[in-house]
């Protein structure tokens, strides 16, 4: 029995040589230490061993078992370490390689210009109020003193929706919406999208953005001088010029009415093809709020007075950014959009 054990040990140790692979190690484990392995078999045959010899044989079995286990353990550790080194070498990671560049977006130039404009008006004490794109005739026209058959109401000019509603043709509905809900003093700007049945061309678009602004207080507190002051400061802050003029004009909802012109930014007033050789470009419409508008929102025109103005954001954007085609703002070609560094402090 002793010789048999020595033979098991000799064979196992020979097979568990330094270069033994995983399969070989496993085979030895199963054959020698397994549940029906060689050592287990011998343990079972212990009954036949004379009593005096049993302890020594038992010890020898345990000793061989420990030896084989230890050897397997050593070899397995060695194999594991070798596998780790191999994978580290093969899947080497070069941490000095430059990373993948993730393109960073930025806000659309029109949104950016709008933000910048609002920031300028906010710095002068105006608050920002959003009003609705889908309007009724009263808030878009009637309350703004448009007579019943004014051509602006024409189907040719205005998008009508089922049920008599329409898409607002200007942000002047904001004046009505805010004033009918609140009482002066008010200094408010209403940005938003407007819609007209125009073709998309170099200078026009069926959808565009406007900012409406108005200031109302007790009669005598807000005059045309305040209107001129606010808009001249706007031109200075936004365009960097105070070369502006107020030219008499007409809107149903203001009296007197004016348009603000600014020295053409391209020729600085000298005259060029863009300003049709006049030296001036039209920037916005404005005026003192018409008494009929006051009445429409149930303000007593004898008690309250104020001014209003409205400007197109895309049109102003063309001037500010030196872009010569409005369509570029709507096509959203990234090669175009990415040319404009941010003007505003970002999205509110
Ligand atoms: N609503 C006018 C437009 O769309 C602009 C404007 C607003 C003019 C307020 C005067 C006062 O052209």
Image: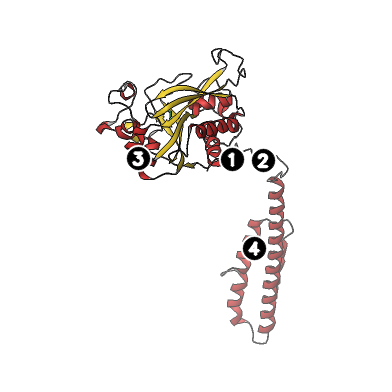
Q: Which label was assigned to residue 345? A: 1
Q: Which residue is mark 3?
A: 300
Query: Which mark is first along the chain, 2 or 3?
Result: 2
**Mark 4: secondary structure:** helix
Q: CA distance from mark 4 to mark 3?
A: 106 Å
* Farthest residue, direction left: 163
In the image shown, does 79 or 135 lie closer to the viewer?
135
Say above or below: 256 vs 174.
Answer: above
In this view, which residue lies farthest toward the right? 18
Circle number at residue 28: 4
Q: Colour scheme in the image?
A: secondary structure
Residue in view at x 43 percent, y 31 percent: 288
Element at badge 3?
Answer: loop
> Within the image, what quadrant is residue 92 found in?
top right
Observer-side mark, 1 or 2, equals 1
Q: Residue at x 61, y 38 (%)?
A: 102
The quadrant holding residue 236 is top right
Q: Which residue lies under the disc numbered 2?
A: 99
Q: Secondary structure at mark 1?
A: loop
Residue 200 placement (x, y as % from top left):
43, 21
Local packing at callout 4 (Cα closer than 10 Å; few below 14, some 14-19, many 20+) is: some
| Among numbered discs 4 and 2, the one appearing first in the sequence | 4
Q: Earlier in the sequence, mark 1 or mark 2?
A: 2
Q: Is residue 299 above or below residue 7?
A: above
| Residue 276 image point, x, y percent | 54, 13
Q: Earlier in the sequence, mark 1 or mark 4?
A: 4
């Amino acid at each position: 029995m002793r010789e048999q054990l020595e033979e098991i040990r000799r064979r196992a140790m020979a097979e568990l040589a330094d270069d033994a692979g995983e399969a070989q190690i496993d085979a030895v484990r199963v054959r020698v230490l397994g549940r029906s392995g060689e050592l287990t078999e011998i343990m079972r045959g212990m009954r036949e061993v004379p009593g005096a010899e049993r302890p020594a044989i038992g010890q020898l079995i345990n000793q061989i078992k420990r030896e084989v286990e230890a050897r397997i353990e050593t070899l397995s550790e060695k194999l594991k370490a070798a596998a780790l080194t191999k994978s580290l070498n093969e899947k080497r990671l070069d941490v000095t390689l430059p990373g993948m560049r993730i393109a960073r977006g930025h806000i659309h130039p029109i949104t950016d210009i709008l933000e910048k404009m609002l920031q300028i008006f906010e710095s002068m004490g105006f608050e920002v109020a959003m009003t609705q794109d889908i309007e009724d005739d009263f808030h878009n026209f009637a309350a703004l003193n448009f007579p019943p058959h004014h051509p602006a109401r024409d189907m040719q000019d205005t998008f009508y929706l089922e049920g008599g509603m329409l898409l607002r043709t200007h942000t002047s509905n904001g004046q009505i919406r805010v004033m009918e809900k609140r009482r002066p003093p008010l200094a408010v700007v209403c940005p938003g999208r407007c819609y007209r049945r125009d073709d998309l061309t170099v200078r026009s678009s069926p959808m565009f953005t406007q900012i409406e602004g108005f200031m109302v207080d007790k009669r005598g507190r807000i005059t045309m001088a305040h209107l001129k002051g606010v808009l001249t400061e706007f031109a200075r802050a936004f365009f960097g010029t105070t070369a502006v003029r107020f030219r008499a004009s007409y809107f149903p909802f203001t009296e007197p009415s004016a348009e603000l012109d600014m020295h053409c930014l391209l020729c600085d007033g000298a005259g060029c093809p863009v300003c049709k050789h006049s030296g001036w470009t039209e920037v916005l419409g404005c005026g003192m709020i018409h008494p009929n508008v006051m009445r429409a929102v149930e303000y007593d025109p004898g008690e309250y007075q104020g001014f209003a103005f409205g400007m197109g954001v895309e049109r102003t954007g063309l001037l500010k950014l030196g872009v010569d085609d409005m369509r570029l703002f709507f096509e959203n070609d990234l090669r175009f959009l990415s040319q404009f560094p941010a003007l505003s402090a970002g999205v509110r």
